[in-house]
Image (tube, helix red, strand yellow):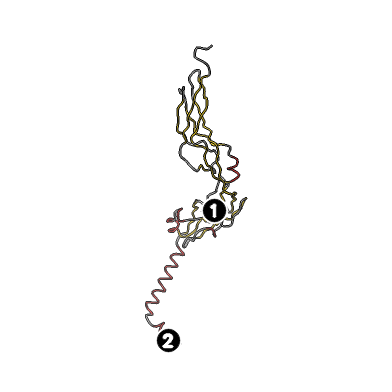
Amino acid sequence: MTEFLQRWVRQNLGLKLFSLALAIAFWAALAREPRSEVAVQVPIEFRGMPENLEINSEHIPSAEVRVRGPERLINRLHPEDVHVRIDLDGVKPGERTFDLSAQQINELRDLEVVQVVPSQFQLSFDVRSQRQVLVRPRVIGQFAAGFRIGHTVSNPSEVLITGPRNRVEAVDFATTDAIDASGVTESQTFSAHIFIPDPLIQVADRKPVHVTVIMERTSSPGSK
């Protein structure tokens, strides 16, 4: 066994010594290479959201990931190379605090994640809900003398909304964009988009609704 090892060491000894010297020189060059640190702002990615839940928080923070390493690699780093991943598997309705650390960052070869800001953040979750709400047209304008809005008809008269349950239940009705009915003396149909001020509420059908504005007289012609 000893004789075999000696023969193996002596075989191509010059090439092996050259390879060793090259490896040492490469390591020494890396050790002398300037090191840099950069802060990368990236969105937080959520995985494994339960089908029946929705995030009930309007403001979801992004993460500032501070990365350190050889200057040549830092200069090549792009925000899309960095991923902050949070696993939502098993979350339930209510508030939940999440920790952010290097463990939530994808592996960055030859680079070190030294800090993640914020180190914690909190989200609220609620059960997904949906229901139909009335459409209330919003009509404006300078109407002809002796006329006023008699009534309005929206088609469809209701829309389906979805979102976190407590927010869905708080919506009394949906409005339309302002409809200018200036100059209308009988009836006219307008196309308008639906608007709900809560940013976490979604309208299932985003097609414009058709609103018919029907005017009526406030007084008879020639009356005083």
- Between 104 and 183, which is closer to the camera in this rendering? 183
Q: Could you say where residue 43 lies in the image, as x and y percent from the top left? A: 50, 51
Q: Is 126 placed above or below 8 here?
A: above
Q: Residue at 44% of width from left, 67% of height from top? A: 28
Hey, what amino acid is under mark 1?
Answer: Glu
Say left or right for 165 vs 155: right
- Between 224 and 140, which is closer to the camera in this rendering? 224
- Between 6 and 52, which is closer to the camera in this rendering? 52
Q: Residue at 50% of width from left, 43% of height from top? A: 204
Q: Could you say where residue 164 lies in the image, as x and y percent from the top left? A: 57, 46
Say left or right for 97 vs 153: right
Q: Which residue is mark 1?
A: 51
Characterize the local packing of mark 1: few (<14), some (14-19) or many (20 or more) Cα atoms within 10 angstroms. Answer: few
**Quarter of the image with the N terminus in it:** bottom left
SS at circle 2? helix
Report, in whole angstroms, how far the alpha carbon at label 1 lies from the one at label 2: 64 Å
Hey, what amino acid is under mark 2?
Answer: Phe
Q: Earlier in the sequence, mark 1 or mark 2?
A: 2
Q: Could you say where residue 120 lies in the image, as x and y percent from the top left? A: 59, 53
Q: Residue at 44% of width from left, 64% of height from top? A: 30
Q: Is 21 placed above or below 218 here?
A: below
Give the image quarter of residue 162.
Answer: top right
SS at circle 1? loop
**Quarter of the image with the C terminus in it:** top right
Q: Is 160 placed above or below 214 here?
A: below
Characterize the local packing of mark 2: few (<14), some (14-19) or many (20 or more) Cα atoms within 10 angstroms. Answer: few
Q: Which residue is mark 2?
A: 4
Q: Which mark is residue 127?
A: none
